[in-house]
Amino acid sequence: MPVKQFWALTVYPRATMSFIYHDSNRTTLSSYDDDNMKKNADGGVTIYVGPKAPVGLESNWLPTAGKRPLPAMRFTAERML
């Protein structure tokens, strides 16, 4: 879905539904981080979620710190008439 105004992905641990804290100091990736993320050829971004960041793609990664993750995506799409 084309998201023109805002998007955000937060990963929560299922056991507590709180933030997953990590040395990366990142609990969410969003369109506010877009300038710092590596882009795909089509201009989109791929977000990686897991215990370790893929080499060279740390800016596109959300840590799980060994927790069982529950992703939550928020977005505002362009209004279609």
Image (cartoon, rainbow, N blue to C red):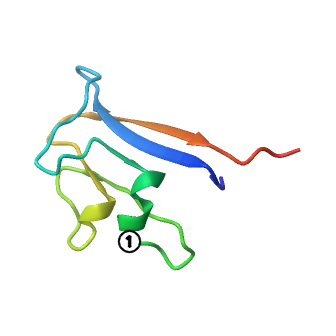
Amino acid on which the number 1 mark rests in the picture? Lys
Mark 1 sits on what residue?
38
Image quadrant where residue 14 sits = top left
Q: Who is closer to the viewer here, 2 or 50?
A: 2
Residue most extreme to the right: 81
Image quadrant where residue 20 sits = top left
Q: Residue at x 14, y 43 (%)?
A: 22
Residue most extreme to the top: 16
Q: How far from the left and from the top, in percent, is residue 7?
A: 52, 46
Q: How far from the left and from the top, in percent, is residue 56?
A: 23, 74
Q: How far from the left and from the top, in percent, is residue 23?
A: 10, 48
Left or right of 75? Residue 18 is left
Q: Residue at x 46, y 44 (%)?
A: 8
Image quadrant where residue 68 sits = top left
Q: How far from the left and from the top, in percent, is residue 32?
A: 43, 53
Binning the other alpha carbons within 10 Å of mark 1 as few (below 14), some (14 to 19) or many (20 upward) gives some
In this rendering, is residue 44 above or below 2?
Answer: below
Left or right of 35? Residue 23 is left
Left or right of 70? Residue 53 is left
